[in-house]
Image (cartoon, rainbow, N blue to C red):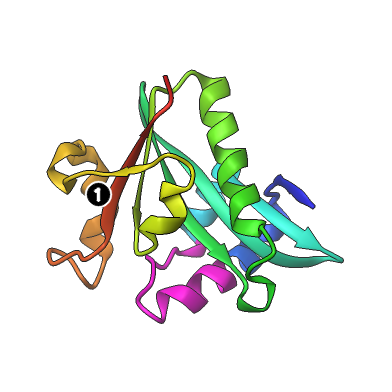
Amino acid sequence: MLRKAEINDVKEIQKLLTHFANRGEMLSRSLSELYEAVRDFYVVEEEGKLLGTTALHIVWEDLAEIRSVAVAEDAGRKGIGTQLIEASLAEARELGLKRVFCLTYKPDFFARFGFRIVDKAELPHKVWGDCMKCVKFPDCDEIAMILDLQ
């Protein structure tokens, strides 16, 4: 079941994100950050188990980021990631956003939704606030992608 995240989901969201962060595949998020941003998150759960999550983080009046996309390894290849991205994009459109970007190691996945690769320099400097926390900064090897919604 796809739904907006609730406060009671935060510790499980962090556990899922930390699993992939420990492998260098995404940024880790503190509990404090997650509680502050819980309204940004969607989750997919089944029988009380969190199977996947993502967040739509608004950056500016016309721009948002899809971030923290994670699907439990034992739940892969079931369309959960697709559900999460589609929900985030639908919300972005409802809010009237013009563009959505992501930083990813899986460009083929995001290309299926119409995202295209862009040079990171095309993204506003405000985007890089979280990057300062990354162990890979300033040598980021993620791929920047953007989707025009209008």
Residue 60 in the image: state x and y as whole percent.
Answer: 34, 27
Question: Which residues lie in the magenta part?
Answer: 14-31
Q: Quadrant of residue 71?
A: bottom right
Q: Is residue 148 left or right of residue 117?
A: right
What residue did someone put label 1 on?
A: 129
Amino acid type, mark 1: Gly
Residue 36 painted magenta: no
Outermost residue on the right side: it is 47
Q: Residue sitting at 55 percent across and 42 percent down?
A: 40
Q: Is residue 65 left or right of residue 117?
A: right
Dot 1, how many residues are within 10 Å of its Cα: few (below 14), some (14-19), or many (20+)?
A: few
Q: Nearer the viewer, residue 36 or 134?
A: 134
Residue 70 in the image: state x and y as whole percent.
Answer: 54, 64
Q: Secondary structure at mark 1?
A: helix
Q: Is residue 111 above or below residue 126?
A: below
Q: Residue sitting at 43 percent across and 50 percent down?
A: 110
Q: Quadrant of residue 46?
A: bottom right
